Amino acid sequence: MNNVDSDLKLVSESEKENFIQELKKINWVYWLNRPYSVFLATLVWDGCREKFFGRAGLKGIAIDNYLYQFPDIYYDKRFHDRGVAYFDEYFKSHKVSELSDVLEKTHRHHITELKSIINDNKKTIPQKTACMSDLIKDYIFYLNIVNILEEHFNKRIAIEVPKYIQGDYAKFVGDICVPIKKNAYVLMLDEIMAAVPVKDIKDKYGWIKSRDGFTDFYTEGEIEEIKRNYKEPHKHEVNIPEGLKDLAGELKELNFFRTDRTDKFYEFAGVARPLLEDIAKYVGVSLKELSNYDANSIILGEPKRYDKNFSYGQINDRYVITDDLLISDFKKHESEEIKGRVAFKGIVRGIARIVIHSDDIDKVKEGDILVAQMTFPSFISAMQKSAAFVTDEGSITCHAAIIAREMKKPCIIGTKNATKVLKDGDMVEVDAERGIVRIIK
């Protein structure tokens, strides 16, 4: 066994049943649909604990307990309740930019450290895996707090905006929260349009398509395709009342932060590709197959494989990973009705295309309905072809809502179940007047 230090403990078979009973007593709340790989999940999820949240400068808040049953994530309701109260107090004297600034500083340091680890000839592969895991866990705080941040700012929007804007203020809020800072995809577009050599762009930004370190990066041909399809986004000035300028500044930063935190996480995974390839060789499998291995078992020198449809449960510093469901009696998606919030009005019909990953965007054709858990900048080329967008997640300040208003396309957000109920090829009507999506029989 490898003597790499770790305070995360795999529950033994003899203790597994008692651990599962503990999991069942927790008040789990369904959160997100994310098809994570076994490797990436086990590499990072220890970062949910207070030890790692504290390293981001915010002590007294953590997830502690975590449940993943492919592809669904649940969190302990206590984390949500404590988190909302925490950030209500935090933002009395802090700004979102402080989170962005700490993340930027952490990211620059961690990329340098990661490259050093990759080139270190003295460390063993399990030791390198452990070092990479310790670094990447520092991103998990930022990935997990956005829904709580949005809840805080939604409350502020509901209190402050009606003082100045009468009636339906969703469009106004969407217009004032368009970020000023540029995310990685926009920076890539700038370089594409500035005629930077395609190879240089691929080497610098190819990871944007991967978003997990394992799947393909952008090819030069795909970057050329992005250039051919590029359309200048619609821009217009918004008159912001003086009393809302502070809130508007915070919303702009929040929208940048939402994308920037995932950009940096996946850039780290992209830079780690050479190390992932070395780990795959150590285990004796292909890079793709490595995605099914528990990273912690590799750190301990005893690589263990799990099925793609795995489950993972964590209570503080103990965890279980299994090919079976840990809790089988959840009822998340009882309703077949698809309802959400209107981000941009309109009524259209088209063929539903479920887009979970950047690899899925090629199946979207002109006039299709893009259906996603949430949208990312790397989805833009598919969004340009789509007649409308429907998402499981999001608020009026989310990426899909902003792009819908820029492109003037009907959009319904926050349905919770669209990607569960709809299937590729369904003919659907998106009624973004009432916030309803229905399958046309």
Image: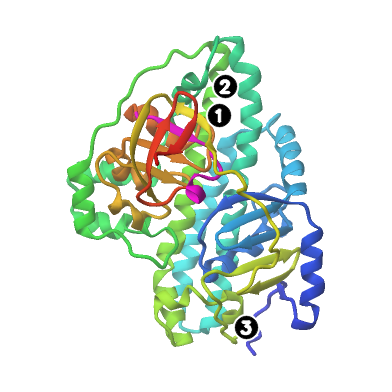
Residue behind mark 2: 246
Q: Which residue is mark 1?
A: 250
Per the image, label 2 sits on a secondary structure element best described as: helix
- Figure check: 98 above or below 321: above
Alpha carbon of mark 3 to alpha carbon of mark 1: how far? 44 Å
Q: From the image, tell me which residue sits under label 3.
A: 300
Q: Earlier in the sequence, mark 3 or mark 1?
A: 1
Rendered view: 303 above or below 98: below
- Under mark 1, the amino acid is Glu
Category of crowding for the residue at label 2, using alpha-carbon neighbours closer than 10 angstroms: few (below 14), some (14–19), many (at least 20) = few
Front residue of 295 and 340: 340
The image quarter in which residue 376 lies: top left
The alpha-carbon separation of the residues under discs 2 and 3 comes to: 49 Å
Percent of width and height locating residue 398:
49, 36
Rendered position, 106 above or below 247: below
**Residue ID at (44%, 12%):** 239
**Which numbered disc, 2 or 3, marks the residue that appears first in the sequence?**
2
Residue shown at 63% from the left, 17% from the top: 160
Considering the image in quadrants, where does the N terminus appear?
Answer: bottom right
Q: Which residues are magenta?
A: 409-421
Decide: few, some or many residues near mark 1? Use Cα within 10 Å; few <14, some 14-19, many ≥20: some
Q: Mark 1 near mark 2, Cβ–Cβ under 8 Å?
A: yes
Amino acid type at circle 3 is Leu
On the picture, is 230 further left or further right than 323?
Answer: left
Q: How many marks?
A: 3
Distance from the alpha carbon under mark 1 to that under mark 2:
6 Å
